[in-house]
């Protein structure tokens, strides 16, 4: 029943958003929003990178340059691939995945709803005073017969020291990577990490299975971290990052993006560079799927959840309950009191999501990156997370999760309670 309610809720949101936005934003929904050639990149407030999808070979051994600079002077290999450095504003959102055409009427309808539902998400921006820089490019994901090219936004910490790690941050169902922008900036700064936020399709009618909950897509994302990480390196280079990406990485995601992060972790469980998984009210398609994933994931790979109270938007907390049940004797995360499913989106959310899901409190919005930043820094350093502050910021309360008796609804998915 929890799964049915979750899908019904998603369908209701899709229909509601589609009607509202298709009436008032048909132009925005139809505009593919591409203002640069595929594979090109621009960096907010810094120089433009290569117009190619990346270097002819991974930039192993390239001396570190400031993010946004295509190459350091004297680096012949990088200079050959770099454009003349110019100042340019960040482009509008690139909808490489959603802009495709389809011969399947049902798939086309869902694509139209996706475009409408995402039309009012705000464009990414870097807050005043932040040292983080933003770059855009495309990312080649080996999903489907010909692969899938998706929009990717990169956030570079731009500090004096080498980055401590790489964070893969995935948006939720029916969203795109703009919804993760505020969180990405905050995490990049707090953890001194490079953050990449790809846009994956939410079209469940895609024949190839290359959508956010599809196993082919999950396996394809896992493949990005294998070997020399050629696709990630090329995408980062095209976004303006002219040095080697950090080897150690954390997988993270909001809602369905959290479910994808867990699936990728299962595929890459033997990778010693995988530091851990952090979910932001993460949701898998079924609780059984989460349980199965955790049964094969090595115990050394910690899976952490910043949960909101059970609701239709997180499948009545089924994924959180499965996580607690699978690892009952260890710390698995916290519940934010009075939290909402979109706390992690923060300033990057939109009015329609707040209308349907609820308005997050400013304190909880601030608490999400405060908690996650501490966890990710610990994981990247090779440590193990054992808790979180009860009051990470003034006005927010985070309580550890533990397994408890079923709630009044008698639904097993409600069988987690905060520990007092």
Image (spheres, rainbow, N blue to C red):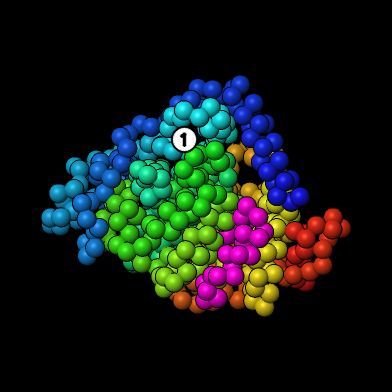
Q: Position of residue 42 (x, y in %)?
A: 33, 42
Q: Left or right of 392: which side holds 31?
A: left
Tell me, yes or no, if residue 20 can be seen here: yes
Residue 336 belongs to magenta span: no
Q: Position of residue 157 (x, y in %)?
A: 39, 58
Q: Position of residue 344 (x, y in %)?
A: 59, 52
Residue nearest the observer in this picture, 222 or 362: 222
Residue nearest the observer in this picture, 408 or 237: 408
* Image quadrant where residue 415 sits: bottom right
Residue 262 in the image: above or below residue 44: below
Residue 283 belongs to magenta span: yes
Q: Position of residue 16 (x, y in %)?
A: 67, 31
Quickly name the residue at label 1.
98
Tell me, yes or no, if residue 362 can be seen here: no
Q: Left or right of 362: which side holds 132?
A: left
Query: What range of the chain is rendered magenta?
Result: 279-301
Say which residue appears at 62% left-offset and 29% top-offset.
18
Residue 308 in the image: above or below residue 13: below
Q: Left or right of 394: which side holds 176?
A: left
* Image quadrant where residue 138 sits: top left
Say which residue appears at 38% left-offset and 32% top-offset.
34
């Amino acid at each position: 029943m929890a799964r049915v309610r979750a899908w019904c809720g998603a369908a209701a949101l899709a229909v509601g958003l589609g009607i509202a936005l298709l009436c008032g934003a048909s132009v925005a929904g139809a505009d593919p929003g591409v203002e640069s050639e595929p594979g090109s990149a621009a960096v907010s407030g810094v120089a433009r990178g290569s117009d190619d999808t990346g270097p002819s070979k991974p930039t192993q051994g390239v001396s570190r340059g400031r993010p946004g600079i295509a190459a350091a002077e004297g680096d012949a290999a990088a200079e050959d691939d770099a454009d003349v450095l110019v100042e340019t504003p960040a482009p509008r959102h690139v909808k490489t995945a959603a802009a495709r055409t389809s011969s399947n009427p049902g798939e086309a309808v869902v694509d139209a709803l996706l475009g409408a539902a995402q039309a009012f998400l705000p464009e990414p921006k870097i807050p005043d005073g932040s040292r983080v820089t933003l770059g855009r490019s495309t990312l080649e994901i080996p999903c489907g017969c010909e692969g899938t090219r998706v929009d990717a936004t990169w956030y570079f910490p731009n500090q004096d020291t080498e980055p401590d790690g790489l964070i893969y941050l995935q948006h939720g169902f029916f969203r795109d990577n703009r919804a993760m922008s505020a969180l990405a900036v905050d995490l990049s700064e707090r953890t001194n990490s490079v953050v990449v936020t790809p846009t994956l399709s939410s079209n469940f009618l895609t024949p190839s299975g290359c959508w956010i909950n599809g196993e082919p897509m999950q396996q394809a994302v896992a493949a990005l971290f294998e070997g020399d990480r050629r696709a990630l390196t090329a995408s980062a280079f095209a976004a303006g990052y002219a040095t080697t990406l950090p080897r150690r990485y954390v997988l993270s995601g909001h809602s369905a993006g959290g479910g994808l992060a867990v699936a990728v972790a299962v595929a890459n469980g033997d990778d010693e560079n995988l530091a851990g998984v952090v979910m932001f009210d993460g949701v898998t398609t079924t609780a059984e799927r989460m349980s199965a994933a955790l049964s094969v994931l090595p115990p050394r790979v910690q899976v952490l959840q910043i949960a909101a109270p059970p609701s239709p938007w997180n499948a009545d907390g089924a994924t959180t309950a499965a996580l607690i049940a699978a690892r009952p004797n260890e710390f698995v995360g916290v519940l934010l009191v009075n939290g909402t499913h979109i706390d992690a989106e923060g300033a990057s959310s939109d009015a329609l999501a707040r209308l349907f899901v609820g308005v997050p409190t400013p304190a909880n919005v601030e608490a999400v990156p405060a908690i996650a930043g501490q966890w990710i820094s610990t994981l990247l350093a090779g440590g193990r997370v054992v808790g979180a502050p009860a009051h990470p910021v003034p006005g927010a309360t985070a309580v550890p999760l533990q397994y408890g008796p079923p709630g009044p609804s008698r639904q097993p998915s409600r069988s987690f309670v905060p520990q007092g």
